[in-house]
């Protein structure tokens, strides 16, 4: 009988998985409960710009139980109920502040909000999604203090390491800003995640594989990737309608093959939280992959990696 390989992250999965990360940290499963706290974003309210990033449609990823018209406590309760029905073993939860920029408010307002979320008896920690230009020393010092007693992760939308791409999608900050925010967060011992979108117009597979080296140089704990989807009603949708030739989209098997190559180059120290995501077909304009569940995407990736005997970081030279 062949012996099972255990990779350097401590289990037999061919990538450093999010569930493994929480097993190592807490000894068991952790479920995220999404909360919409009603923030906006400086790239939408006119402070930096109006209309936002050309690809932005927060609705496409917000679960139905989230609404800023409900209190944080109620959204947490409803989210826990939802997950307990789906995953009977779920009993520890992280409040996930996902929509818009969740540090875009005065510190006093942020601390009131996050203290309330953390006082819920079933909430073990918070994950706060934001823009890299929406944090400063004072806010990070607050999150550092909080992280001494509860799990705290900041998750930055980085999207691309190319300033040219960031300008083209009207991001309103450059890559140096993202690096600074990630470093300032990591220096304080706060868990830090980065979100990237793969396949913006003009970005080739070779360029994206090279970009992985830049990502590897960031002091991140977790990474999330998404293939580009063009959502209805966005500036990118208008561009797509006018210039479809500027876009190219992966078929699902091609994306799995491409992402496997990226994964082989990705630092093994990064926890891979997401590698693709498909919003419901009614939201997007580009040819999508149909209704496919996240679990199925992971299975396809795992099968591909096993078939080719690939694993995360095998080509990484630190
Ligand atoms: S920073 Fe986030 S919320 Fe703001 S416009 Fe861009 S994608 Fe949308």
Image (cartoon, rainbow, N blue to C red):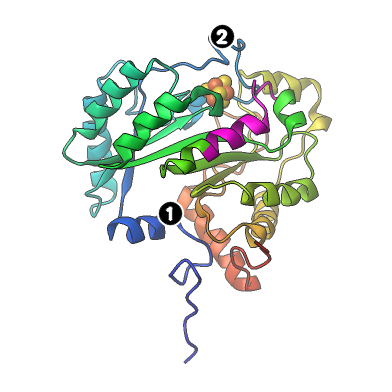
* Residue depicted at x 65% and y 22%: 54
Q: Residues within 10 Å of mark 2 (few under 14, many from 20)?
A: few
The magenta segment is 169-183
Secondary structure of the residue carrying tag 1 is helix
| Front-most of residues 24 and 87 | 24
Quarter holding residue 174: top right
The answer to whether mark 1 and mark 2 are in CB contact below 8 A is: no
**Is 40 located above or below residue 87 in the figure?**
above
The residue that mark 1 highlights is: 18
Q: Measuring 53% from the left and 53% from the top, which residue is drawn there? A: 297
Residue 152: horizontal and vertical position, in percent?
A: 35, 40
User: In the image, residue 247 lies at what x, y percent?
Assistant: 77, 34
State the residue lying farthest toward the top. Answer: 46
Q: Decide whether the magenta segment is chiefly helix, strand or loop.
A: helix
Element type where label 2 sits in the image: loop
Compared to residue 177, the image places residue 148 above or below, namely below
> Relative to residue 251, is residue 42 depicted above or below?
above
Residue 29 placement (x, y as % from top left): 30, 55
* Residue at numbered disc 2: 47
Is 318 left, or right, of 75 in this rendering?
Answer: right
Q: In percent of the image, x 78 and y 46: which residue is there?
A: 207
Closer to the camera in the image, 60 or 123: 123
């Amino acid at each position: 009988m062949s012996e099972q390989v255990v990779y350097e992250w401590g289990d037999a999965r061919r990538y450093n998985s999010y569930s493994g990360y929480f097993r190592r940290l807490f000894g068991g499963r952790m479920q995220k409960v999404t909360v919409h706290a009603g923030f906006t974003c400086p790239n939408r309210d006119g402070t930096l710009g109006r209309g936002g990033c050309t690809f932005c449609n927060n609705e496409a990823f917000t679960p139905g139980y989230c609404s800023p018209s409900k209190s944080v406590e109620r959204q947490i309760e409803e989210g826990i109920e939802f997950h307990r029905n789906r995953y009977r073993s779920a009993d520890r939860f992280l409040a996930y502040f996902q929509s818009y920029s969740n540090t875009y408010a005065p510190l006093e307002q942020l601390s009131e909000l996050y203290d309330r979320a953390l006082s819920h008896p079933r909430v073990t920690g918070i994950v706060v999604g934001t823009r890299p230009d929406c944090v400063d020393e004072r806010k990070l010092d607050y999150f550092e203090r909080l992280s001494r007693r509860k799990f705290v992760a900041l998750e930055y939308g980085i999207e691309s390491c190319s300033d040219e791409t960031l300008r083209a999608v009207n991001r309103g900050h450059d890559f140096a800003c993202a690096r600074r925010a990630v470093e300032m967060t990591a220096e304080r011992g706060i868990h830090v995640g980065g979100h990237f979108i793969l396949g913006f117009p003009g970005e080739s597979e070779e360029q994206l594989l090279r970009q992985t080296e830049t990502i590897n140089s960031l002091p991140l704990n977790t990474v999330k990737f998404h293939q580009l989807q063009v959502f209805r009603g966005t500036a990118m949708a208008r561009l797509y309608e006018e210039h479809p030739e500027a876009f190219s989209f992966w078929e699902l098997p091609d994306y799995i093959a491409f992402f496997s190559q990226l994964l082989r180059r990705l630092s093994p120290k990064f926890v891979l939280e997401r590698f693709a995501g498909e919003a419901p077909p009614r939201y997007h304009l580009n040819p999508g992959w149909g209704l496919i569940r996240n679990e199925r995407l992971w299975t396809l990736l795992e099968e591909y990696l096993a078939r080719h005997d690939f694993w995360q970081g095998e080509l990484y030279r630190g």
